[in-house]
Amino acid sequence: MKKLLALVVALAFAAGSAGVVVAQAPTPAPAEKKAEMKKMPVKNANGTVKAASADSIVVAGKEKSKEVEWTFAVDPKTSIRRGGKSITAADLKPGDSVHVRYMDMDGKAVAHSIMAKGGGMMKKEAKTEKK
């Protein structure tokens, strides 16, 4: 009977210890970041490029009938396209019309994708072909 009681106590102690270890196990950081990103809404902005560099783009446009200016951070994950082809942020020129999908991350507007509408090299090529 004493052996049975000792066995039950030992099993209860082992189960309790295992529960504490499992409860203290840290959750993986990438999973936390993915959960945070899912909570952040994707926003849209339309406007005209005022300035562009390899790591940022400044766009002027309208939001709720007011003239506004946005500065978007651009990172290697940002998809930038014109006419179905990938380009870089440095390829964007002042006056280009763009649609930007972005998220606010740590107080910064980070561009997820930028679509340049028409323009750029295509307009110049079309004008030369007409002549």
Image (tube, grey):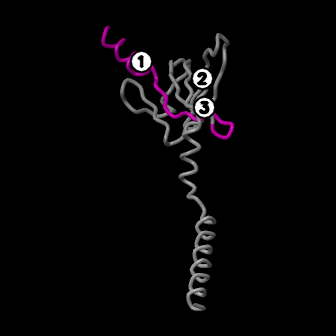
Q: Mark 1 belongs to which amino acid?
A: Gly
x and y, in percent, of residue 2 in the image:
60, 91
| Amino acid found under the numbered disc labelled 2 | Val
The answer to whether mark 1 and mark 3 are in CB contact below 8 A is: no
Ranked by sequence position, the earlier of labels 3 and 2 is 2
The residue nearer to you, when weighing 117 against 66, is 66
Query: Does the stretch in magenta take in 113?
Result: yes
- x and y percentages locating residue 97 in the rendered image: 50, 18
Of labels 1 and 3, earlier in sequence is 3
Magenta-colored span: 105-131
Question: Quick one: SS at disc 3?
Answer: strand
Name the residue at 60% across, 86% down.
5
Tell me the element at label 1.
loop
Asked where in the image residue 51 lies, by quadrant, the reply is top right
Question: What residue is shown with label 2?
Answer: 59
The residue that mark 1 highlights is 118
Sort mark 3 into few (<14), some (14-19) or many (20+) by Cα contacts within 10 Å. Answer: many
Looking at the image, tell me whether mark 1 or mark 2 is earlier in sequence order: 2
3D distance between C-alphas at marks 1 and 2: 16 Å
Task: Pinpoint residue 123: horizontal percent, then vertical percent.
Answer: 40, 15
Q: Quadrant of residue 43?
A: top right
- How far apart marks 1 and 3 lie (CA) works out to 21 Å
Of 76 and 15, which appears nearest the observer?
A: 15
- Asked whether the beta carbons under mark 3 and mark 2 sit within 8 Å of each other, the answer is yes
Q: Where is the N terminus found, in terms of image quarters? A: bottom right
The relative height of residue 115 versus residue 29 in the rendered view (above or below) is: above
Residue holding disc 3: 72
Residue found at the far front of this picture: 1
Q: Quadrant of residue 38?
A: top right
Q: Is residue 52 magenta?
A: no
Give SS at disc 2.
strand
